[in-house]
């Protein structure tokens, strides 16, 4: 039997792994060959799915961190709307499952229909031959309680590494406040009515640059687990080219795919623009503080064994600024402790330079320097990614190198993100648990 969906995600994950391992062991004892299903196969039963996947189980391949709706369309919600959203996966697999989120909803969310498909010829199109209905406990629709998340049934769809998947969701509504990720740096499409099974993107007459009611996509395939990047706008991709997949975790995923297949891992982006370690953000869509969202966005991600922590600049530079480095250090120590309690490796990243940004002051710079010295020298983290050393201008270390600067003196552009990813020793990211 599949693990109960009433269990927390972390328990479901381990229950699923045990189920998969048991099924794979039985197949091997019988001398069976564990073969992959064709892309057009029907969705197998849970036992067959576990045997097909072998002992690898589920792993997250795409994720986003959701935020509280506080204004605009997110607060107003939607009625009789289909969302078609493009997810760029890191590692592929032969099956997928979708994670829906109503974490910040104030009423039950009804999803009347959902589909997965590979992209078609034009933006917003899907390849009709790959269009798959998504079910939840065998039903085409699902009701997600306020404050909850749900995981779909397995969908047989062969997804390649470094590929796009289009998710279409129909919400009859009215939904009330909509759980979302504000800055997707990716274009999605909206239409009236149920267009989940419509191949052509021409049926969608509006676009969106947010992710709606989604927080993850898992796959089954041969990987070593997943790595979560917990961060702010620099991890989220501010300053990168929209629809080009040039966030620094995207570039890092490209490097990861050069590894032998057993060493590859899912790359999960849990960055939120404006996010902070200690305080809830000042503007809509910027999310709960990192300590508050740590469990949901990092520690219980499917198959995750490593979390990279790259936060702190907004605590320093936003209003209600932190001038005591020890408060930020205490937050990092909490994240390390809680990650280690879950058997995860916790990697720290230094805070990049931001002189030239409107809120920079010498006093705030001193806090950044002190925090970075602690990240590098304390030994609290299992490893350190020295983002500051990569981005800083050798002629003026308080500023980003001009060729890496997006133009606002805080966020890197595409070249800066590529340089950050290129500087990471991939071996320190191994998601195999401690």
Image (spheres, rainbow, N blue to C red):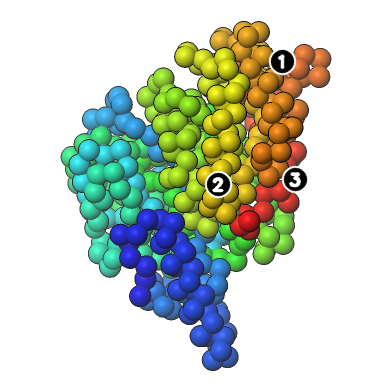
Q: Circle 1 is placed at which residue position? A: 398
Of mark 3 and mark 2, the one earlier in the sequence is: 2
Q: Is the residue 278 above or below the residue 270 in the image?
A: above
User: What is the C-alpha distance between the residues marked 2 and 1?
Assistant: 31 Å
Of mark 3 and mark 1, the one earlier in the sequence is: 1
**Residue depicted at x 58% and y 34%:** 332
Judge by depth and name the residue closer to the eye, 388 or 243: 388
2 and 1 marks in contact (CB < 8 Å): no
Label 2 sits on a secondary structure element that is helix
**Residue depicted at x 67% and y 64%:** 262
Q: Is the residue 241 above or below the residue 130 in the image?
A: above
Q: Quadrant of the C terminus?
A: bottom right
Q: Is residue 424 visible?
A: yes
Mark 3 nearby-residue class (10 Å; few <14, some 14–19, many ≥20): few
Q: Circle 3 is placed at which residue position? A: 425
Residue 16: image location, x then y, percent: 44, 67
Judge by depth and name the residue closer to the eye, 178 or 385: 385
3 and 2 marks in contact (CB < 8 Å): no
Judge by depth and name the residue closer to the eye, 127 or 23: 23
User: What is the C-alpha distance between the residues marked 3 and 1?
Assistant: 24 Å
């Amino acid at each position: 039997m599949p693990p109960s969906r009433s269990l927390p995600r972390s328990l479901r994950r381990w229950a699923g792994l045990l189920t998969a391992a048991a099924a794979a062991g039985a197949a091997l004892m019988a001398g069976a060959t564990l073969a992959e299903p064709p892309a057009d196969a029907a969705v197998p039963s849970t036992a067959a799915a576990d045997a097909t996947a072998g002992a690898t189980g589920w792993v997250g391949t795409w994720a986003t961190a959701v935020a509280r709706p506080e204004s605009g369309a997110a607060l107003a919600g939607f009625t009789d709307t289909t969302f078609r959203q493009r997810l760029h996966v890191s590692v592929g697999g032969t099956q997928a499952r979708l994670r829906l989120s109503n974490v910040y909803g104030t009423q039950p969310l009804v999803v009347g229909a959902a589909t997965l498909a590979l992209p078609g010829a034009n933006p917003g199109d899907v390849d009709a031959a790959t269009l798959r209905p998504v079910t939840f406990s065998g039903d085409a629709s699902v009701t997600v309680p306020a404050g909850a998340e749900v995981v779909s049934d397995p969908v047989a769809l062969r997804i390649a590494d470094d590929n796009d998947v289009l998710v279409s969701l129909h919400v009859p509504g009215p939904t009330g406040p909509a759980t979302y990720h504000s800055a997707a740096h990716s274009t999605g499409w909206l239409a009236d009515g149920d267009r989940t099974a419509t191949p052509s993107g021409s049926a969608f007459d509006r676009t969106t640059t947010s992710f709606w009611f989604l927080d993850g996509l898992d796959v089954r395939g041969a990987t070593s687990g997943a790595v979560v990047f917990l961060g702010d706008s620099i991890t989220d991709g501010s300053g990168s080219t929209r629809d080009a997949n040039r966030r620094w975790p995207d570039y890092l995923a490209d490097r990861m795919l050069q590894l032998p297949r057993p060493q590859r891992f899912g790359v999960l982006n849990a960055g939120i623009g404006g996010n902070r370690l200690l305080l809830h953000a000042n503007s809509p869509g910027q999310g709960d503080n990192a300590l508050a969202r740590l469990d949901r966005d990092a520690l219980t991600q499917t198959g995750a064994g490593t979390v990279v922590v790259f936060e702190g600049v907004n605590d320093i530079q936003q209003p209600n600024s932190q001038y005591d480095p020890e408060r930020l250090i205490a937050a990092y120590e909490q994240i390390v402790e809680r990650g280690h309690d879950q058997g995860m490796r916790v990697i720290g990243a230094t805070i990049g330079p931001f002189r030239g940004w409107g809120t920079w002051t010498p006093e705030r710079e001193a806090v950044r320097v002190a925090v970075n010295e602690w990240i590098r020298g304390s030994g609290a983290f299992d490893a350190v990614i020295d983002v500051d050393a990569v981005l800083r201008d050798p002629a003026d270390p308080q500023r980003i190198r001009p060729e890496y600067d997006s133009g606002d003196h805080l966020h890197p552009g595409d070249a800066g993100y590529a340089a950050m990813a290129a500087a990471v020793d991939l071996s320190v990211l191994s998601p195999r648990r401690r």
